[in-house]
Image (cartoon, rainbow, N blue to C red):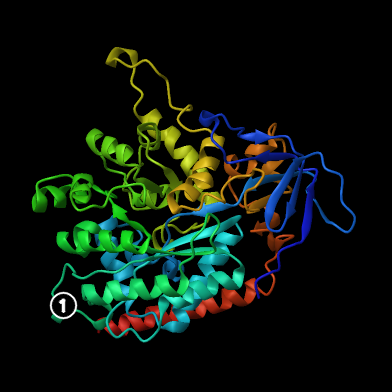
Amino acid sequence: MTPAIEPSLLIRNAAAILTGQDMRAGHAERIAGPDIRIAGGMIEAIGRLPPRPGERVMDATDCVVYPAWINTHHHLFQSLLKGEPQGLNLTLTPWLGATPYRFRAAFDEETFRLAARIGLIELVRSGCATVADHNYLYYPGMPFDSSAILFEEAEALGLRFVLCRGGATRTRGLESALPQALRPEPLDTYLADCERLVARYHQVGPNAMRRVVMAPTTPLYSMSPEELRTCARTARRLGIRLHSHLSETVEYQNVALALHDTTPVAFCGEHEWLGPDVWFAHLVKLGPLEIRALGETGTGIAHCPQSNGRLGSGIANIPALEAAGVPVSIGVDGAASNEAADMISEAHAAWLMQRARRGEQARAQAEGGSAEGGADAARIEDVVRWGTAGGANVLGLEGVGTVAQGQSADLAIYRLDDPRYFGLHDPAIAPVASGGRPSLRALLVGGRVVVEEDAIPGVDLALLGVQARAAVEQLVQRAERMRA
């Protein structure tokens, strides 16, 4: 059951508060607080606030408050495919065949639901309140409704959930040679289901709890150019956003040039797939003109540093993208290419990888270099902004993502009671800089306390582990039988 909104809640005596706001726009990245009052699910006041009669008081002494994280790209069904041996040391294209495609037909309703639950709980425990899942597990005659399962599991945990309805009308293989679960959908079927989902689930407003996004799996592979344009126009008629993968590896560049004599970003622009209502996952391999086009159109990115590192794809140039005007957010991608699919791990990686990327470009003075390294490439405050307000921006949820008066009370309150945080001169940076998972004093979503004292009501983690181990065995056996 979804927790109730507290009529009035006072968070008292926080050691530090990061707001997620943008200093470049004149906003404070940190505020002293130390108290935050929440009423009716919204942040009513911030400052030094005396308790009101009958008001619930939550002690945040020695705790750090962040806006709750917003994950803008995931594949939750992959939560039962972590560390799968056949794909562990492969790059993207062979990995797709070795792991997610090989196991796709092995999922039934029970294992799909369990995978979604595991992924969502992993995110919740990192302080994440909003999840955008790029679900592409659909096929003709599918015996269960994967969309409904995702919404149900998110609602049970009290999360905001954005379904990015994936799918494909064509495949790289011949349909007649494919098992049923790998066959593409007709365009009419795909569009009709998007309309069904919008009518049933989609909510408008700056702090909506449920959204639907049109998200063909990959523009260059999943649909014809004409179908992509039809999808874009249909989405805009329905008032929903567009999402997909793009430029994750050099193979996107190879295919776009070979098939369309252009770049991936230019191809998308030609088919109405750029704009402030569009965001792409990855965007690792881009040329200067592509970065400029993304910025000029306000097209966003879901930066997935751990998956891009795990698959050896590279590191997206986030400072250049942001400087060009590209809205930046953070996504964890699927757990089959990211065995730590949580927002704390992702934020930590984003912070380090941007610095490493710039450091790799350093050259000796004899080679024309002038800088020693790249420690100025990303600050903690930048990473928090990308993972909170940045996510709200690309999802069109302007009422969440920052700690500010009048915003929805989506807050992660972290205890710094582990030795990894001892000795820090600045406790505000602890969750991102030190990595690991700080325990949650509380996680609030729209003023509802969905985690308290690091516990999720109704969730038995030991039982979940037992179920996961059994499900992995089932999936492996089914996949082996299907290949025989």
User: Relative to residue 401, is residue 335 drawn left or right?
Assistant: left
> Percent position (x, y) of residue 411?
65, 52
Mark 1 surroundings within 10 Å by alpha-carbon count, few (fewer than 14), some (14 through 19), many (20 or more): few
Quadrant, the N terminus: bottom right
Quarter in which the C terminus is drawn: bottom left
**Rendering coords of residue 440 (x, y %):** 69, 55
- The residue lying furthest to the right in this view is 53
Image point 22% across, 72% down: which residue?
187
Q: Which residue is outermost to the front?
A: 237
Report the front residue among 393 and 472.
393
The residue singled out by tag 1 in the image is 175
Q: Amino acid at mark 1?
A: Glu
Q: Residue at (88%, 59%) from the top-left corner? A: 54
| Residue 294 placement, left or right of 7 | left
Is residue 163 visible in this depiction of the protein? Answer: yes
Corner quadrant of residue 55:
bottom right
- Residue name at image x 78 percent, y 48 percent: 60
